[in-house]
Amino acid sequence: QVQLVESGGGLVQPGGSLRLSCAASGFIFSSYAMNWYRQAPGKERELVAAVTSDSGSTKYADSVKGRFTISRDNAKNTVYLQMNSLKPEDTAVYYCNCRVRGRSEWGQGTQVTVSS
C-alpha cells in the first residue's frame, strides 16, 4: 500500500531554515506529482507547494513564494521542501500528499514551529 513518511520538522527561530523530507513507497513514485500541504491550528489545510512527476514544473502558495523550494529525487523516492526565511506564520503541521489511482494519500505529518 502507499506509504508517505515525513521527517525534518522541528523548532526554529524566525529567519531560520528547515528541510522537510517525504519518503514514499508502494507506488511508482516517478509517475506521480507530489504535493506539500500544511495545517495550522484552527485553520484549513492548504497547499504549500507542488511538483510534477519529472520536476518539470513547480507551483507555490503566494505566502511562501521566494522562500520555499520543492524538489524531488526519483531515484530515492523522496520529495523535499526546503524552507528558508521562516516566519511565525509558517508554524503548522506539514503533510506530504499525492493522488494515486484516484485516491488522495497522506503522510502522518511533521510539526514545524517557528518561534523565538
Image (spheres, rainbow, N blue to C red):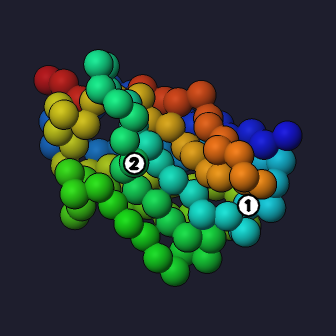
For this rendering, which residue is in front, 106 or 115?
106
Which part of the image, by quadrant, shows the C terminus? top left
Residue type at the position of mark 2: Leu
Q: Residue 108 lies in what quarter of the image?
A: top right
Residue 96 vs residue 99: left or right?
A: left
**Residue for badge 1:** 29
Q: Which element carries disc 1, helix, strand or loop?
A: helix
Q: Residue shown at 22%/63% (left/top)?
A: 66
Q: Residue shown at 29%/19% (left/top)?
A: 42
Residue 70 vs residue 21: left or right?
A: left
Q: Residue furthest front?
A: 102
**Residue for badge 2:** 47
Which label lies toward us, 1 or 2? Answer: 2
Where is 34 relative to 21, above or below? Answer: below
Which part of the image, by quadrant, shows the N terminus? top right
Q: Residue shown at 22%/57% (left/top)?
A: 62
Q: Residue shown at 20%/51% (left/top)?
A: 63
Q: Which element carries disc 2, helix, strand or loop?
A: strand
Q: Residue 29 lies in what quarter of the image?
A: bottom right
